[in-house]
């Protein structure tokens, strides 16, 4: 698996110790992938539809943990080969309770009508639906509730083929209704990502533990992290700017520099600095992934330091070799044109030592002289030899 999948896998098993933390994480998951519908008969159903199996499993675990509800989990393969998971809370009372606890609906409302998060006590404007469509919605809900009730072993053994066909038909209906581009006839959505942020959702995030849980849920539903062996990048994709600004505000509360960029009509909250990504994993409570990323960062840092040192030493060596070749070339030219005997004694000694030790550094060359000379002194004498060679070339009219 990729590093991003490993992080999601670890986070999918991390459950908050308190119900308010679980509610905050559930709110983040619903806001990113939730599809909440109310039928013409005021029956609410929650569908959590995603391609991310870790998010779907976490949603199911949170529902089981908080409400002891058995959700319907369905999987199908799309034409493009991608798997689509749908976790369905079909019972009206359960769905309303979940939406209230996660800040999507008012707890003061007594019926579904008037529970829009952006309306105080007004009723929901329902589109008129034909009687046949209402019956279809009721039949679908009845099928879902029927499959949620465990059957006896005798019933299962008596009709295995009929049960398989029944389950396949229900799965097709549920997933068809859960597809983003389709709606259940005679029903309308009562939830959107922009609604509820100012009052209800923010009321869940007064505690630091809940803020951690919310960020964890948002990353599970719509986040990703690059392979840290290549580069550092963590991002969470939001459908609205308001949602992105909330995530940016939460990351800032933990001292993290989350930035927002618009990409293809969506808003992406991202972090690019390796140390801050480590801190983000700590905030989301993923210690295993945090330690793995830290080990990779340390290894990359050591490797980078070694490479820089090697490159520096290689550059210095190339510079030293190039200078030595030039010095020997000038000394030989003087030797061929005028002879080394005409040089002053100290320059003659320097020229002979350099010719005898073409690969030796200036410091080591100084130790070969009598008396020994410093590196700066050796460099000064070699520059004088190069100057003499240039004067001979100019005198003889040669173009180097």
Image (spheres, grey):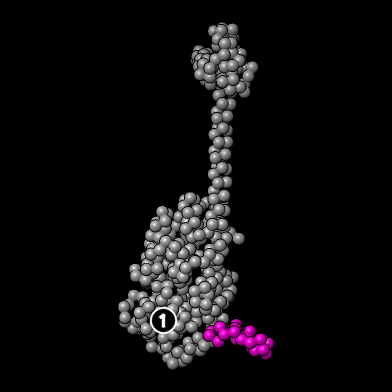
Q: Residue at x 50, y 82 (%)?
A: 90
How far across and how far down the image is residue 86, in percent? 53, 75
Q: Residue at x 39, y 57 (%)?
A: 253
Give the vertical position of 340 relative to 226 (above or below).
above
- Name, please, the residue furthest toward the front: 18
Examine the structure image and report whether residue 376 is included in the region drawn in magenta: no
Q: Is residue 178 visible?
A: no
| Local crowd size for mark 1, using a 10 Å CA cut-off: few (<14), some (14–19), many (≥20) | some
Give the vertical position of 5 relative to 172 (above or below).
above
Chain part drawn in magenta: 144-168
Q: Which residue is mark 1?
A: 188
Q: Main secondary structure of the magenta part?
A: helix
How far across and how far down the image is residue 13, in percent? 55, 66
Near-viewer residue (119 or 127): 119
Near-viewer residue (197 or 394): 197
How far across and how far down the image is residue 371, in percent? 57, 11
Near-viewer residue (268 or 31): 31
Instruction: Please indicate whether residue 148 sits to the left or right of residue 26 in the image.
Output: right
Secondary structure found at label 1 = strand
Examine the structure image and report whether residue 152 is included in the region drawn in magenta: yes
Q: Residue at x 62, y 17 (%)?
A: 355
**Figure disc tally:** 1
Near-viewer residue (155 or 193): 155
How far across and how far down the image is residue 215, in percent? 45, 63
Q: Quadrant of residue 1?
A: bottom right
């Amino acid at each position: 698996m990729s590093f991003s999948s490993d992080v999601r896998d670890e986070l999918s098993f991390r459950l908050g110790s308190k119900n308010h933390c679980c509610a905050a994480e559930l709110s983040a998951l619903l806001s990113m992938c939730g599809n909440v519908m109310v039928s013409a008969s005021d029956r609410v159903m929650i569908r959590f539809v995603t391609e991310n199996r870790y998010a779907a499993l976490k949603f199911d675990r949170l529902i089981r943990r908080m409400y002891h509800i058995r959700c319907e989990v369905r999987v199908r393969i799309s034409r493009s080969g991608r798997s689509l998971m749908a976790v369905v809370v079909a019972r009206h009372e359960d769905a309303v309770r979940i939406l209230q606890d996660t800040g999507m609906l008012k707890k003061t409302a007594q019926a579904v009508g008037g529970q829009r998060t952006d309306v105080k006590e007004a009723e929901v404007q329902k589109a008129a639906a034909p009687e046949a469509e209402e019956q279809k919605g009721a039949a679908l809900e009845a099928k879902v509730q029927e499959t949620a009730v465990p059957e006896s072993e005798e019933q299962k053994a008596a009709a295995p083929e009929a049960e398989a066909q029944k389950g396949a038909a229900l799965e097709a209906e549920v997933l068809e209704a859960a597809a983003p581009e389709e709606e259940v006839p005679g029903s309308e959505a009562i939830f959107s990502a922009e609604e509820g942020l100012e009052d209800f959702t923010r009321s869940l995030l007064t505690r630091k533990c809940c803020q951690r849980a919310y960020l964890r849920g948002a990353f599970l539903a719509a986040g990703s992290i690059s392979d840290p062996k290549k580069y550092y990048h963590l991002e969470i994709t939001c459908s609205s700017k308001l949602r992105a600004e909330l995530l940016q505000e939460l990351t800032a509360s933990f001292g993290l520099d989350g930035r927002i960029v618009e990409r293809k009509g969506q808003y992406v909250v991202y972090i690019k600095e390796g140390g801050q990504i480590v801190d983000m994993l700590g905030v989301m409570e993923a210690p295993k992934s945090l330690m793995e990323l830290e080990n990779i960062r340390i290894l990359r840092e050591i490797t980078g330091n070694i490479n820089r040192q090697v490159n520096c030493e290689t550059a210095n060596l190339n510079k030293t070799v190039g200078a030595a070749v030039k010095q020997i070339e000038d000394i030989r030219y003087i030797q061929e044109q005028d002879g080394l005997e005409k040089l002053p004694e100290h320059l003659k000694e320097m020229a002979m030592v350099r010719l005898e030790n073409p690969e030796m550094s200036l410091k080591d060359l100084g130790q070969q002289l009598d008396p020994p000379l410093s590196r700066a002194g050796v460099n000064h004498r070699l520059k004088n030899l190069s100057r003499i060679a240039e004067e001979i070339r100019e005198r003889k009219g040669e173009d180097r």
